[in-house]
Amino acid sequence: MKLALNTLPRGKSEQIFDSVAQLQHDKSIEWKPLRLELKLGIDRQGQNFYLNGSVSCTGLFICEAGMEEFEATLESNFKVMLTFDSKYLEGYEGDEIIQIPAHESEFDLYPLVHDSVLLAIPISHVCSDDCEAGKALKQKLEIEVEPDERWAKLKDMFNE
Ligand SMILES: [Zn+2]
């Protein structure tokens, strides 16, 4: 997922990246990425590149309520400024700024995409508010923790 900096036109342009392979091979990801689309808006101004990424990633996740697999699409955005000129690092008040080493002609977008996708995963990730598998699982657990008479007797013995 490399952005070729030296061939970018001045001003505004847009590029689409849709290879999901790198996410799929990422060992740190515990769910299955299926599809990815990054729409990247680029604004090249001299030594600076203003990037505005919209990420849409579909994957198979494990529902926290029912433990079943479900498909979901995560939408996220990132904004970052790339610059060849270190003077911009001081006093810049945007979201994020990355300095590109001189003579570097490519910028790897993958770390930005990776972080953006992972931050988009909800803290409690469930298939829906009304998870059928979750209800079934809850019911099953409730039956299993139903107090057993023998245990109740044993408990009484200890209490005596
Ligand atoms: Zn579920």
Image: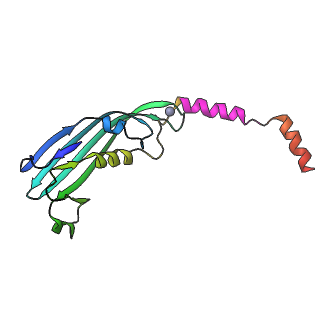
The residue closer to the viewer here, 7 or 74, is: 7
Residues in magenta, as a range: 133-146
Tell me where residue 50 appears, x and y as whole percent: 17, 54
- The picture quadrant where one finds residue 117 is top left
Q: Position of residue 7 (x, y in %)?
A: 9, 46
What is the x, y in percent for residue 35? 31, 32
Q: Is residue 50 left or right of residue 36?
A: left
In the image, residue 102 above or below residue 116: below
**Residue found at the very far right of the displayed protein:** 160
Which residue: 36% across, 37% down?
25
Dominant secondary structure of the magenta stretch?
helix
Q: Could you tell whether 11 is left or right of 66 in the image?
A: left
**Residue 145 as seen in the image, left or right of residue 47:** right
Picture quadrant where residue 31 is located: top left
How was the colour assigned to the protein in this rendering?
A: rainbow
Q: Residue at x 46, y 47 (%)?
A: 123
- Of residue 134 and residue 24, the one placed in the foreground of this image is 24
* Residue sitting nearer the eye, 150 or 116: 116
x and y, in percent, of residue 45 in the image: 9, 56
49, above or below 117, in the image: below
Does the stretch in magenta take in 143?
Answer: yes
Q: Give residue 22's quadrant in the image.
A: top left
Magenta stretch: residue 35 in it? no
Number of numbered discs overlaid on the protein picture? 0
Residue placed furthest toward the left: 10
- Location of the N terminus by quadrant is top left
> Is residue 82 toward the left or the right of residue 8 in the image?
right
